Amino acid sequence: MAMLVVGALLGWPTASERLHIASAQEKKTTDDLQRNVLPIPEPQFKGKIGRTVKASESDFPKSVEAPKGAPNVLLILTDDVGFGASSTFGGPVPTPNMDRLAANGLKYNRFHTTALCSPTRAALISGRNHHSCATGNIMEFATGYPGYNSVMSKSCGTVAQVLRGNGYNTSWYGKNHNVPDWQSSMAGPFDLWPTGLGFEYFYGFVGGDSDQWHSPLFENTIPVEAEEQSGNKLTHLDQILADRAIKWIQTQNAMAPDKPFFAYYAPGLGHAPHHAPKDWIAKFKGQFDHGWDKQREMTLENQKKMGVVPATTKLTPRPEEIPAWNSLNDDQKKLYARMMEVYAGGLSHCDHQIGRVIDAIAETGELDNTLIIYVMGDNGASPEGTLQGTTNECATAGNGVTEDLPYLMSMIDKLGGPETYNHYPVGWCHSMNAPFQWTKQVASHFGGTRNGLVISWPKGIKAKGEIRSQFHHIIDIVPTILEAAKIPMPESIDGVKQKPLEGVSMVYSFDDAKAKERHTTQYFELVGNRGIYHEGWIACTYPARLPWVTVGALPNPDDFKWELYDVSGDFSEAENLAAKNPEKLKELQALFDVEAKKYNVYPLDSSFADRADPAIRPSLTRGRTVFTYYPGMVRIPEGSAPDVKNKAYTMTAEVEIPEGGANGVIATQGGRFGGWGLLILDGKPVFVHALSNQTKHKYRVASDQKLTAGKHTIKVDFAYDGGGIGKGGTATISLDGKEVAKGKIERTVGVRFSLDETFDVGSDTGTPVVDDYTDKMPFKFTGKLNKFVTELGKDGLGLNDQKKLKELTEKLVGAVE
């Protein structure tokens, strides 16, 4: 009662007056919001200010709301999956969740990507061509030109920035390969990480590929500790990502059921390593014994029956460099069939986890008004597994490690598990791109650029189970989302004038199968391979190098041979008309030049080695020889860590050992498939080096002297033999200035330790370098580590070896595309 009296004296509104004010607030709308500028201008105060609260009228600033009826959006992008892989588009791998979306929505059979990872992903989230947003190649191949520097301009605002600024919650799960190489460490900057690109929440990995059993994950910009990922249970990454997405969707719906969400779900499969749970691999036992040639024929036949391709579609020939299945011996057939079983198990399991996310949306009651865009692959299937496949992509691609058939056969039952970093042979890659020519990397042909697309939106699309054959491209996704949400692309974001969207919305085709296509011109270009589509015709260059051969001299881009196809009737680019219609070819070549100038494609560059050289890009380590680290500094990417390859070095650890002793990782880089580690095992200092996952490539130098309680200085001096890349050397361990162990490292990693693992101090956040601590991961050091110092010696390579190193780096980096 006293408060009521005081309230009346002060002019506070009564309870009934407060209810009236609240009711008035609820009636306010945001229909008049100025959505052409972000952030949307704050509304002016529309209440009344009197001398007292009783004589005033309040007006709370209202949060920005999405337009009424705006759909939720689930954007799905898988990795390295060809047009002819999924069951939805006639392939052999069951993808029932993509199938059910297609049955309740639309299939697009003339949808295209850029033929490579980072470029496709930049174009997808920005709605601009990949060169327009500075991503003319993968992050590791950035060069100092506007179309290629990998630093996406703030004038290319993302769909997440637009949706968040218009009242959506936004999140991203899985692969991010759009952070510039030199900005991917904990030093940032973070404005080109997902959280800087409009995504309120990110849970995934930053890089080209990831071990699916020990993924180097980040939550927003903070490394996720290994035990938080999966502990020793080895949960597959796809399940982890689905769990995170489901939790976020459920929480978002519980907290703000009237607020739409945008979730970008980008799993790492089917990119290598092809990891899958054993029971999922077992589902496909014996299903690929017929081989890759027969599979292509079966796929095309099925595609025709489904109407996914026209009945007149021809099967393009297998390149003669890929062996015929019937030319293989029995062991090769058994091994390669198993590799395909593993791939199929991984992709099918991935689709299953996507289905769990879709089911979670259905459980919230929001599925009818959720626009689901499911892109099966960011490019065609990958040829980077070599002609025979591999159990260790990094070691074989760049570090000079060979795997003969007997060794590969010995690993056949481990394929897909944590002891392999596996990839299938080129023959299966080519088969998964049926009926088209070529593969991933080849931007000039549909084997590299045509991917299956399904769109489902029950509330917004009347048609069910139909096929759409209008030409479309990855840059059309953003305009489609924005039109469906009734949100304009803003003229400016955070004060930066925006480039116009370069894609075309596909909404016009949703309920009109015969609608005239609106995306009538589209260029393609990567590493000199290029093409131009215009009104049913495509002119394109013939690949100057085989995509599975990533080293060697390349011709001038102007010398590439051109082809011409009438794809209005020739669905698979089977009949080259260049000789029959040279005038049409010249017309399209001229059009390519116009588009190339318009979208920052020039200068053309067919090289790999020069692009792969880190010396041409900004660096956190260049010019430094001494590096000091402290415990807990983990997840440091290889490009931001001391480069101890092909040179002498000294590592020094200042430690304190408690009574009873200590064990654990002092420092490590890489892991099971290539790396080194300074460890304390059974209380003794041990230095290990792994050239690969093969037992014969695991080297160790170990002291037999246990560390006593107290302070100690542990030092490793490595004397490099020299004479080339990845040669051996001698490691000497000293304790408090006294030599306690010395041994030979016969071969060292010369190009790259890992495609995804990092440099860690005080623990191991990835895979173990040696099996001694597999069941103890992350094997944190149980003593006190005061500091760890690395001092680099002189580079041990001559000019010729440095040139060769560039070529090997080119070959290896090509494997993470």
Image (cartoon, helix red, strand yellow):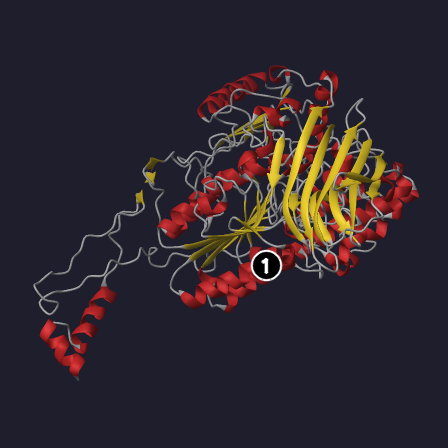
Query: Would residue 809 be found to the left or right of residue 190 on screen?
Result: right
**Residue 692 visible in this rendered orientation of the protein:** yes
Q: Residues within 10 Å of mark 1 (few under 14, many from 20)?
A: many
Q: Position of residue 552 (x, y in %)?
A: 73, 21
Q: Is residue 694 above or below residue 456?
A: above
Dot 1 corresponds to which residue? 242
How many numbered dots are placed on residues in this image? 1
Of 691 and 716, which appears nearest the observer? Answer: 716
Q: Dot 1 lies on which element?
A: helix
Residue 799 to residue 648: above or below: above
* Residue 195 placement, left or right of 242: left
Q: Position of residue 110 (x, y in %)?
A: 56, 40
Above or below, 778 against 141 in this view is below
Residue in the foreground of this view, choosing between 684 and 482: 684
User: Of residues 730 and 322, which is closer to you in this image?
Assistant: 730
Among the 4 quarters of the image, the one containing residue 331? top right
| Spot occupied by residue 213 in the image (x, y as percentages of width and height) | 70, 53
Answer left or right for 529 relative to 461: right
Q: Amino acid at mark 1?
A: Ala
